[in-house]
Amino acid sequence: MSKGRILIVEDEMIVARDLQLALVRMGYSTPAIAISGKLALKSVAKVRPDLVLMDIVLKGGMDGIETAQQLTAEFDVPIVYVTAHSDRGTFARARLTRPCGYILKPFDEKRLAETVEAALAHERRERSRAGSPSPEQAATVLVVQASLELQSVITVLLCGRGYEVVLSNRATDAVPMLRETRFDLIIADLVLPDARGTVFVRGLRREMGIATPVIVLADMVTPEDLAFVKAEAVSCLLSSSGDFEFRLLTEVDRALGRSAAPEPEETRERDWATVL
């Protein structure tokens, strides 16, 4: 029995076939491959897929982002982008369509499997919640991260948990979002293109008066960064290496009150030290 129907929208046939073979090995059916936005619209109407893998750059009158906008409006089908492009303008446009995730070319089969599974699980939860007479409001997480790859990983993980994710590449883009929207959690990188994460978080706390829980991601930190974590009441300073995905979900659940019990403070301090 198929785990789900997935439409592939990709104009590079070698890439499309590789995706198709990988998905079939995972137990999914791929009823069609569309090589243009126009064909994608016709295919979705015909096969009613559970998920669409959408290349951002397509030949013809519509690119993948325009196609995704129409598919979402007409069919309410979840989209996962497949792209080799990570420039800020393209990603900003793609983000507006609220995709379930991103897969970077050349794709990794393990990441493909994780992304597809999380996207489908998120869609099932959303439809179940929509049919419930008293749906629980999903927590909304702002992710301030310049790396497209890490944005993709974090989005997939959090959407798979049922959280709503809003993305920002820069601190200066995140500030107006925070003025307009109340977020339940902020995940920020320690190093951003236009500001150090410590400066960004300190501004939230001291200038904007925002007390929202914050998780800071880092590759390497200094003792001064650890002092900042305590001074600004940061929930966690988390290394983006090693078993990052498991630890991120653990800390997100804890910050949003989903964990069974809080971890002792001395244990949290030992965790911070491991990123040095």
Image (cartoon, rainbow, N blue to C red):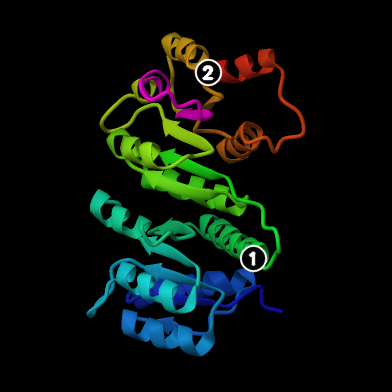
Residue 180 placed where, x, y %? 38, 42
User: Mark 1: which amino acid?
Assistant: Arg
Q: Quadrant of the N terminus?
A: bottom right
Q: Residue at x 56, y 47 (%)?
A: 158
Secondary structure under the numbered disc 1 in the rendered image: helix
Q: Earlier in the sequence, mark 2 or mark 1?
A: 1
Relative side of 138 to 220, left or right: right
For the point 43% across and 42% down, the residue is 181
| Above or below, 136 relative to 55 | above
**Nearer to us in this view, 259 or 34:** 259
The numbered mark at residue 233 is 2
Vertical arrangement, residue 114 with respect to residue 39, above or below: above
Q: Which residues are magenta?
A: 201-217
Disc 1 designates what residue? Answer: 124
Q: Mark 2 packing: few (<14 Cα in 10 Å), some, or many (20+)?
A: some
What amino acid is found at the position of numbered circle 2 in the picture? Ala
Residue found at x 55% / y 24% = 236
In percent of width and height, residue 159 lies at 56, 52
Q: Is residue 258 above or below residue 152?
A: above
Q: Position of residue 130 (x, y in %)?
A: 63, 65
**How far apart in space, not on screen, are marks 2 and 1 (Cα)?**
35 Å
Q: Position of residue 164 (x, y in %)?
A: 53, 50
Which residue is nearer to you in this view: 110 or 191?
191
